[in-house]
Amino acid sequence: MADDKSKSGGQDRKRINLNEDYEVRDWAAKFGVSQEDLRKAVAQVGDRAEDVERHLKGAKA
């Protein structure tokens, strides 16, 4: 299912869609990591942004 850019709220902002280049770019920038590191984190903990952020912060410590 395509990402509906006209809907900007709800679950869509809480999940990282690795199939959308702009999302990978934007989330990686937000977390201060490379796109590859973001992809690895999503593979390890799932696509919930909160879980990915927690994982990445733990990795930097």
Image (cartoon, helix red, strand yellow):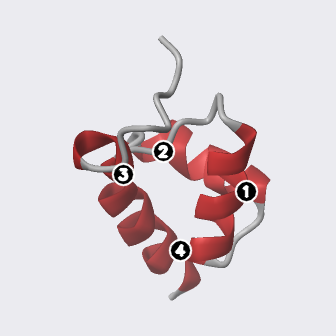
Mark 2 or mark 4, whichever is nearer to me: 2
In screen coordinates, is 27 left or right of 14?
right
In screen coordinates, is 49 left or right of 17?
left
Residue on which the image places disc 1: 25
Residue on which the image places disc 2: 16
Disc with the residue nearer the chain's start (1 vs 4): 1
Amino acid at circle 3: Arg
Q: Is residue 60 above or below residue 36?
A: below
Residue 60: horizontal and vertical position, in percent?
57, 83
Disc 4, SS? helix
The answer to the question of whether label 1 and label 4 lie on touching residues, with beta carbons closer than 8 A, is no
| Number of residues whose C-alpha sits closer than 10 Å to that of mark 3, classed few (under 14), some (14–19) or many (20 or more) | few
The residue that appears at 47% across and 11% down in the rendered structure is 1
For the residues labelled 2 and 4, the Cα–Cα distance comes to 18 Å
The residue that appears at 77% across and 64% down in the rendered structure is 34
Mark 1 or mark 4, whichever is nearer to me: 1
Toward which corner of the image does residue 18 lie, by quadrant? top right
Residue on which the image places disc 4: 59
